[in-house]
Image (cartoon, coloured by chain):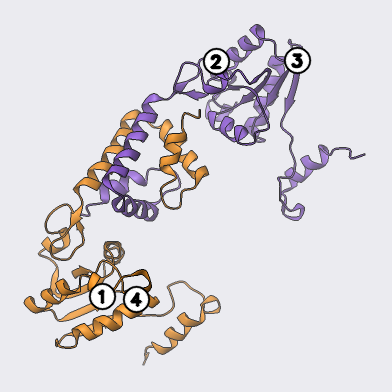
Chain colours: A orange, B purple
Amino acid sequence: MNPLSALIDQLSKLPGIGQKSAQRLAFFLLSLPTSDVKKMASVMVDTKEAIRYCDTCFNISTQQTCYICQDVGRDTKKLCVVAEPRDIFALERTHEYRGLYHVLGGLVSPLDGVHPDSLRVPELVNRIKYQQFDEIILAINPTIEGDATLLYLQEVFKPYTLTLSKLAYGLPAGSDIDYADELTLQRALLGRNKMV
Amino acid sequence: MNPLSALIDQLSKLPGIGQKSAQRLAFFLLSLPTSDVKKMASVMVDTKEAIRYCDTCFNISTQQTCYICQDVGRDTKKLCVVAEPRDIFALERTHEYRGLYHVLGGLVSPLDGVHPDSLRVPELVNRIKYQQFDEIILAINPTIEGDATLLYLQEVFKPYTLTLSKLAYGLPAGSDIDYADELTLQRALLGRNKMV
């Protein structure tokens, strides 16, 4: 029997890794010193076991409160609502936003059985009640599920007097108008900004 | 601090995995049950620790003799010489060859400091001396280093009366003559086969 088949089987479970890539990764792991492979394996298990959700914003964290909620340098008047923790990572990479976050844990999608009550909206409303925010930014994917979630949240926030905003829709940086799909171009036109 | 950074650092050491892919893999690992992550980690370490080289052909193996050298159903009159164990995996996938293998452990490449004496050629010559092979197939990459190795091996095998062959060079299956590079097309012409 192929002595690498168990390893190739495991590696091909990773997203985007087929049999051939898994084999290439397996040979790469064989070429590393045993200590490096042990280190990688232990970081995988340690991270998996250490990660939990932040009690406040539901970001992933190793502690009860995540590093963003703990950060005293953050603008506590701004709250950015996202679907998943990975969206926080993407937004943090921009270095543009310095406020707090709230993770919904998904988007409204009746077809997939995700109804508004399975999202962390009561927790979001609670935060708004007990903490004074100036602005709520809805950083939600421009998809059907995202749009449904935006509509739903708009209703939820109606009783509260606060600025509600959503991310701009339009042309991605470095793109070509010629290649843009109709919906993107339509939204870029509708959202056009005055220059003078 | 980002609680995933250690894991992302480790995963981005894998070939072809950049920061973004590593982050995607990290989130995927978080979504798995802890038992699955532990299983993957332990298979990585166990495989790395169990793998050694076959004493006969230098293929990777968990035992002194690899599963191919142990297989009594193999044609022991044919020997296929390859550069690396991964080449054996590729050839085995074709189900075309049922003989034995010999891994050189590299290709002649003076610029990279790989001289013929750092390859497993003495071991190859020993096998040929003590075991009667009908044919030696050189399955070596059609590159500068591969061609240098072929020339060198041709010299090595001169004193022995056996059939020496190398893989066919030509157009890859499903390719387009129009897109083929000059060298490939030149070799396909030189190696043309009579049809009638």
Q: CA distance from mark 4 to mark 1?
A: 12 Å
- The answer to whether mark 2 and mark 4 are in CB contact below 8 A is no
Residue at 34% of width from left, 53% of height from top? Answer: B28
Compared to residue A116, the image places residue A2 above or below, namely: above
> What number is the disc on residue A116?
1
Query: Residue B178: percent from the left, percent from the top?
Result: 76, 55
Front residue of A7 and A76: A7
Q: Is residue A167 visible?
A: no
Instruction: Compare marks 3 and 2 and give the one earlier in the sequence.
Output: 2
Q: Which residue is mark 4?
A: A146
Q: Which residue is mark 3?
A: B162
| Discs 2 and 4 carry the same chain letter | no
| Chain letter belonging to callout 2 | B
**Relative side of B64 to A43, left or right:** right
Query: Residue A128: percent from the left, percent from the top?
Result: 12, 77
Q: CA distance from mark 1 to mark 2?
A: 64 Å
| Discs 4 and 1 carry the same chain letter | yes
Disc 1, SS: helix
- The answer to whether mark 1 and mark 3 are in CB contact below 8 A is no
**Closer to the eye: label 3 or 4:** 4
**Closer to the eye: label 2 or 4:** 4
Three-letter amino acid code of the residue under disc 4: Gly
Three-letter amino acid code of the residue under disc 2: Thr
Q: CA distance from mark 1 to mark 3?
A: 76 Å
Disc 2, SS: loop
* Quadrant location of the C terminus of chain B in the rendered image: top right
Q: Which residue is mark 2?
A: B56
**Closer to the eye: label 1 or 2:** 1
